[in-house]
Amino acid sequence: MASLNRPARLNRTLLALTGLLLLAAGAFAITTAYGWLPLLDRDRPLVPGTQLPPTWVLYVVIVAAVVLGLLFLRWLGAQALRRPKTTTWRWESVAAEGVTRLDGGLATGPFADEVAQYPGVESADATLSGTQDAPTLLVTVTAGPEADLAQLRERIADDGVARLKQALDLDALPTVVEFRFADQPGTRVR
């Protein structure tokens, strides 16, 4: 089953690298300032003179800042909720009788509508990804504060997923259920 949280590995890696880089820079600054690492003289200015650097240095700094800004925007864009890719399923019967095709989104529409009618559920969304041989069902449920999540999860598995498996003629349908809690308007923390 493919990871449903694709940006997580990239986030952890980039955060770890950024953290290590900042720790190394801080350690270098502290050890140099106290004279423990005599690479730079503490009494000399860091940059000689008060003149501006050459123009090409300013352009390099601007280009580096723009590239870094675009990378951070790309990183921010990767945080958006990504859905697994859906495919069109195809059932072939006898060649003379024809072929049946079913889009994964159409198969999960009635399932999501059914789950949305369960007590304590405010909305539900479902995505059927993978092939017919290795399908995965991702269900996102927005539940109210009064919802019993364990009972809700059990009902989704026993009723909704069982009917969907029967409708799709599947023996097994691995399911991932993600619960979100609906905001209560008017509540305040004091």
Image (tube, grey):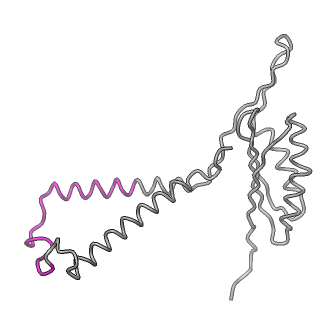
Q: Is residue 135 left or right of residue 171?
A: left
Quadrant location of the C terminus in the rendered image: bottom right
Q: Which residues are magenta?
A: 42-70
Q: Is residue 176 left or right of residue 147?
A: left
Name the foreground residue: 56 vs 95. Answer: 95
Which residue corresponds to the image point at 15% horizontal and 79% vertical from the top-left?
42
Residue 129 lies in the magenta-colored region: no
Image-quadrant location for residue 16: bottom left
Residue 115's spot in the image, x, y percent?
85, 53
**Quick check: 173 above or below 16?**
above
Which residue corresponds to the image point at 76% horizontal and 32% vertical from the top-left?
133
**Quick check: 141 above or below 100?**
below
Residue ranking furthest to the front: 36
Residue 7's spot in the image, x, y percent?
55, 53
Residue 108's spot in the image, x, y percent?
80, 43
Name the foreground residue: 132 vs 85. Answer: 132
Name the foreground residue: 183 vs 7. Answer: 7
Residue 47's spot in the image, x, y percent?
13, 71
Which residue corresponds to the image point at 85% horizontal and 72% vertical from the top-left?
146
Residue 56 lies in the magenta-colored region: yes
Count up the numbered dots.
0
Residue ranking furthest to the bottom: 190
